Image (spheres, rainbow, N blue to C red):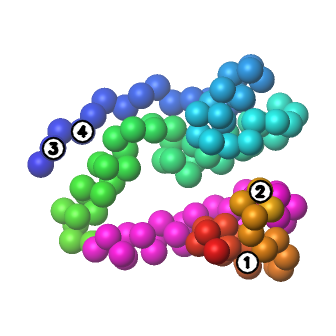
Amino acid sequence: MKKKKAKKEKIDPSSLKVAELKEELEKRGLESKGLKASLVKRLADALEAEGGGDEEGEEEEEEEEEEEAGGSSEENYLEKLWELKDLMLKRLSAGEMKDVLEMNDQFAKGGNQDLAHRIADGN
């Protein structure tokens, strides 16, 4: 069994300045334009999806723990996919989901469930 890596300091998006918010969003390949409130929300959502903001190592640790627990990678993938869809439905408006789909040249019409499904699946 591998030792767990020391966790990085967690980021509090609401305490960051606009320039810092933009920098953190750009690191994650996310849109960095908009008002501070939307930048804070976008970064908070990204950090939550990442599991608290630890960019490196945490995903590997989760995979190792799941393998030790006996879960298959396909089951874990599907579980993560459903978690992502649920998170998008809670956190993003229909307009925001449509914007994401349009930025990725995907079909951007339908109900919230359809939009979240397309974003998560990449179809």
* Label 2 packing within 10 angstroms: few (<14), some (14-19), many (20+): few
The tag on residue 103 is 2
Q: Position of residue 49 (x, y in %)?
A: 56, 52
Q: Are marks 2 and 4 in contact (CB under 8 Å)?
A: no
- Residue under the point 42% across and 28% down: 8
Q: Position of residue 50 (x, y in %)?
A: 51, 47
Report helix, strand or loop for mark 3.
Answer: loop
Q: Residue 109 appears at what percent x and percent y?
A: 85, 76
Q: Reply above or below: 110 against 39.
A: below
Q: Quadrant of residue 30?
A: top right
Circle 4 residue: 4
The residue at which mark 1 appears reads as 113
On the image, numbered disc 3 is attached to which residue? 2
23 up-or-down from 70: above or below: above
**What span is colored magenta in the figure?**
72-101
- Please state which amino acid type lies under the numbered disc 3: Lys
Q: Which quarter of the figure is the C terminus placed in?
A: bottom right
- Name, please, the residue furthest toward the front: 105
Q: Label 1 to label 4, Cα distance in Å?
A: 36 Å
* Label pair 4/3, CB-CB below 8 angstroms: yes
Q: CA distance from mark 1 to mark 3?
A: 39 Å
Q: Nearer the viewer, mark 3 or mark 2?
A: 2
Q: Amino acid at mark 2?
A: Met
Helix or strand or loop: what does disc 2 sit on?
A: helix
Q: Earlier in the sequence, mark 1 or mark 2?
A: 2
Q: Is residue 118 above or below residue 49?
A: below
